[in-house]
Image: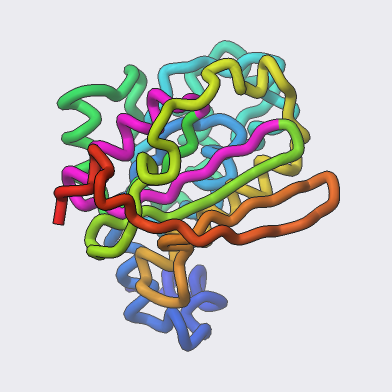
Amino acid sequence: MNDEQLLRYSRQIMLPQIDVAGQEAIIASRVLIIGLGGLGCPVALYLAAAGVGELVLADFDEVDVSNLQRQIAHGHDDLGALKVDSAAASIKQINPDAKVTCITERLEGDALLEQVDFATLVVDCSDNFTTRQAINRASVQTKTPLVSGAAIRLEGQVAVFDSRHEDSPCYHCLYSVDGDENLTCSENGVLAPLVGVIGSVQALEALKVLADFGRPLRGRLLMLDAFSMDWRTLRLRRDPECSVCGGSS
């Protein structure tokens, strides 16, 4: 790290759990963020601010006026622009040292597998079960840590799936059957700060995995009921019969 980086990240470096070695690990990492909507925006901004060396942003959508209520990396002047381009510009305002790679097509098949394999860690900020299951399969196959989040209405959840650990479940262990694809924010609504809270937790969990400190949400599902502001943690077990990770170790 140079002197400017030591100053920029000084408040993190002074934490004994991170120190210089942890910050260097963060800087050396390549994080793939899939989805630059309500969750992906705070994830991208916080990881950029924290010093992640390369952020790969994957989203094929454009900024719409209905996004501005909660997708904080985009502004009114970005209407009609690609979300990855808008988010990249916001990231550069926060941390010009961050390298940003934008992917503007839908990631699937071999292309998804390749990007997950290249990444140090993946943050799933997508909004449908089909995409989440595909990301999970690629994560298990490549043994790339995955931070998964979801938020809708007044409810949110975060979990960490890490196939590098034998006892770690995968997303398919939790949701072996695809959920209701109609459970989207456009159909059911979502409160703006909720995605900020869940996205911030995803960013925090990503940094814990990257810098190897604390107790990540591995084998646990953190759930938030924002109506009553109750947090619950459910323990997750690996399914030995899981068709995705059951025979991966």
Counting the numbered discs, the total is 0
Residue visible at 17% across and 35% down in the picture: 114
Direction from residue 16 to residue 141 in the image, left or right = left
> Is 140 inside the magenta-drawn segment?
yes
Quarter of the image for the C terminus: give it: bottom left
Q: Is residue 94 in sight in this rendering?
A: no
Query: Is 160 left, or right, of 158 in this rendering?
Result: left
**Residue closer to the observer: 184 or 67:** 184
Point out the stretch of residues depicted in magenta. Answer: 127-152
The image quadrant that residue 71 belongs to is top right
Q: Looking at the image, is 178 positioned above or below residue 19? A: above
- Name the spot of residue 237 as percent of width and height, x first: 39, 58
Q: Is residue 117 magenta?
A: no
- In percent of the image, x 26 and y 23: which residue is there? 108
Looking at the image, which is closer to me, 178 or 90? 178
> On the picture, is 223 further left or further right than 1?
right
Q: Residue at x 68, y 15 (%)?
A: 187
> Is residue 234 in view from this perspective?
yes
Residue furthest right in the image? 228
Its colouring scheme is: rainbow
Q: Position of residue 110 (x, y in %)?
A: 15, 26
Measured along the vertical axis of the image, is residue 66 above or below residue 43?
A: above
x and y percentages locating residue 172 in the rendered image: 36, 40
